[in-house]
Each structure stands twice: as structure tokens, then as C-alpha cells.
């Protein structure tokens, strides 16, 4: 890494030697094509504990409120959203209630990390305008609510 300007305060210069070395090792692993997580290198310094749960690689089937998916660990798991989201289905105004419509549920997708439904949520863009957004789940939550099939 190079400094942009010698008068600017550089992030790199603020790092201690061990953190710099850890980042360099992570970059080198990535450059060599080795699978690595930057958090693994930063854990001793900052106490960060990355998730070890796999991610949703591919959706294999979508049945009423159950999605069977291949995960990045090679295991096929099912997530029963009907039971997982039951408490939200009864709450007035719950965004999760939208998922429990059969036609909407069939529109589930994956991005290779998690499961989501496009356009079911809303967010405010930089101009303050409300725009559609995907409704997704943390992949760790999906993993914890899945069962091998």
C-alpha cells in the first residue's frame, strides 16, 4: 500500500505492526487464491469472532413456506419459514407477513449468500425518496433455523 500524499494522515500508518502483518497475510492469501477471511487475521487484535456457518449457495426447491437449499458446505438443508415466522404472521403490519403469502413465497431467490424476496421491503434512498428493497434474512439466522434433509 502506498501513501497518497505525505501530508495526509494515512490509515496504514495508524495500524500496529501485528495488524499490518495480518492484513498483508490476508491479502497474500487472497492473491494466491486461498480461501480466507480477513476477520480470522484480525480476531487476535480486536476480538472479532466471524461466523463459521455456511451460506445459501443454491435454492433447490420452493414448497409452501419451506425452502430446500444447497449450502456452501455441500449439505442440503430445509428452512421451514411457516414455523419460523409463525409469530410474525399474526402481528398486524409485520413485513414478514408478506412472505407467508403462497404466491409471494414462490418468488424467493438467492444471491449465493442468503435467501431474499425482491421488492418486499422499503428503504429511503440518498434523496430521501422511499424505494423498494429486497427483504432478506441474515444467513446465520437461516442456518440456525434449518435442518439437514
Image (cartoon, rainbow, N blue to C red):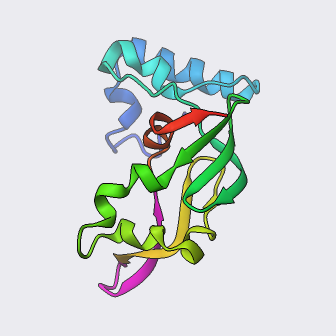
Quick one: quadrant of the N terminus?
top right
Magenta part, dominant SS: strand
Segment colored magenta: 124-136
Up the image or down, 128 lies above or below 38; here it is below
Residue located at (60% from left, 46% from top): 113
What is the number of callouts on the image? 0
Say which of 99 and 87 sits in front: 87
Is 101 within the magenta? Answer: no
Q: Residue at x 62, y 24 (%)?
A: 36
Residue 70 appears at what percent x and percent y? 71, 40
Residue 2 at least partly seen: no
Q: Nearer the viewer, residue 5 or 126?
A: 126
Q: Quadrant of the C terminus?
A: top right
Q: Residue furthest left?
A: 92
**Image x and y of residue 38, in percent:** 51, 27
Give coordinates of residue 55: x percent, y percent.
59, 39
Where does the image place residue 82, in percent across and percent down from the top left? 46, 56
Residue 21 in view in this figure: yes
Q: Quadrant of residue 29?
A: top right
Indicate left or right for 139 with 30 as reference: left
Which residue is located at x 31 percent, y 21 percent?
46
Q: Is residue 149 above or below residue 45?
A: below
Amino acid at each position: 500500500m502506498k501513501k497518497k500524499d505525505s501530508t495526509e494522515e494515512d490509515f496504514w500508518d495508524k495500524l500496529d505492526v501485528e495488524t499490518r502483518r495480518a492484513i498483508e497475510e490476508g491479502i497474500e492469501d487472497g492473491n494466491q487464491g486461498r480461501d480466507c477471511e480477513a476477520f480470522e487475521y484480525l480476531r487476535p487484535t480486536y476480538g472479532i469472532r466471524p461466523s463459521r456457518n455456511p451460506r445459501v449457495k443454491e435454492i433447490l426447491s420452493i414448497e409452501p413456506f419451506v425452502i430446500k437449499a444447497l449450502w456452501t458446505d455441500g449439505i442440503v438443508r430445509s428452512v421451514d419459514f411457516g414455523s419460523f415466522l409463525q409469530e410474525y404472521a399474526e402481528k398486524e403490519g409485520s413485513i414478514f407477513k408478506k412472505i407467508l403469502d403462497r404466491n409471494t413465497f414462490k418468488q424467493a431467490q438467492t444471491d449465493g449468500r442468503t435467501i431474499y424476496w425482491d421488492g418486499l421491503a422499503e428503504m429511503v434512498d440518498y434523496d430521501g425518496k422511499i424505494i423498494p428493497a429486497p427483504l432478506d434474512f441474515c444467513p446465520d439466522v437461516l442456518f440456525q433455523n434449518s435442518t439437514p434433509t
